[in-house]
Amino acid sequence: MEKTEEKNQIVIDAENAILGRLASFSAKQALLGKKVIIVNSEKAVVSGNRKSIIQGYLEKRKFKKVKYPSMPEQILKRTIRGMLSYKMGRGEEAFKRIRCYKGVPKEFENEKKIKSGRENKDLMSLEELSKMLK
């Protein structure tokens, strides 16, 4: 029983991973029926001009009707949600299979993780972005 659960589960290390690429890969895997667990979500990076990124997120958070998160793991999950049809049956089920964690929880320390990032020094991490949004 555990072997099928392991095949059906994918653990992704988000360190230095570009936000959009990570989100699209995670959404695709969730739509295929796999349980997606993303660790170190605060270390994912956003590519682009720093000022325009911050301004864009502040614009989104300005409106009171739309709740846009400021915590890094929630920003990542919201980005993934944008790539799913989360109001329809298949997308809703896929969205429920996605978990994002800040840091690495104890139960996933010994799991085999997919590393999806490269070393980029000039990109802004979600942790930096969330500090600027508060």
Image (cartoon, grey):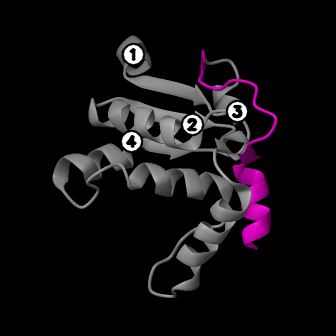
First reached walking from the N terminus: tag 2 or tag 3:
3
Q: CA distance from mark 2 to mark 4?
A: 11 Å
> For mark 4, does the 10 Å Cα neighbourhood hold few (<14), some (14 to 19), or many (20 or more) residues?
some
Location of mark 2 (residue): 38
First reached walking from the N terminus: tag 3 or tag 4:
3
**Callout 2: SS:** strand
Q: Which of the two discs, 2 and 4, sits closer to the camera?
A: 2
Asked if the residue under mark 2 is in contact with the one under mark 1, i.e. CB atoms within 8 Å, the reply is no
Q: CA distance from mark 3 to mark 4?
A: 23 Å
Q: Which of the two discs, 2 and 3, sits closer to the camera?
A: 3
> For mark 3, does the 10 Å Cα neighbourhood hold few (<14), some (14 to 19), or many (20 or more) residues?
many
User: Based on the displayed image, in which of its 4 quarters is residue 109 positioned?
Assistant: top right
Query: Where's residue 115, x and y in %?
Result: 62, 21
> Which quarter shows the C terminus?
bottom right
Q: Which of the two discs, 3 and 4, sits closer to the camera?
A: 3
Quick check: 129 above or below 115? below
Which of the labelled discs sits on residue 124, or is there none?
A: none
**Callout 1: SS:** helix
User: Based on the displayed image, in which of its 4 quarters is residue 8 positioned?
Assistant: top left
> What is the span of residues highlighted in magenta in the rendered image?
112-134
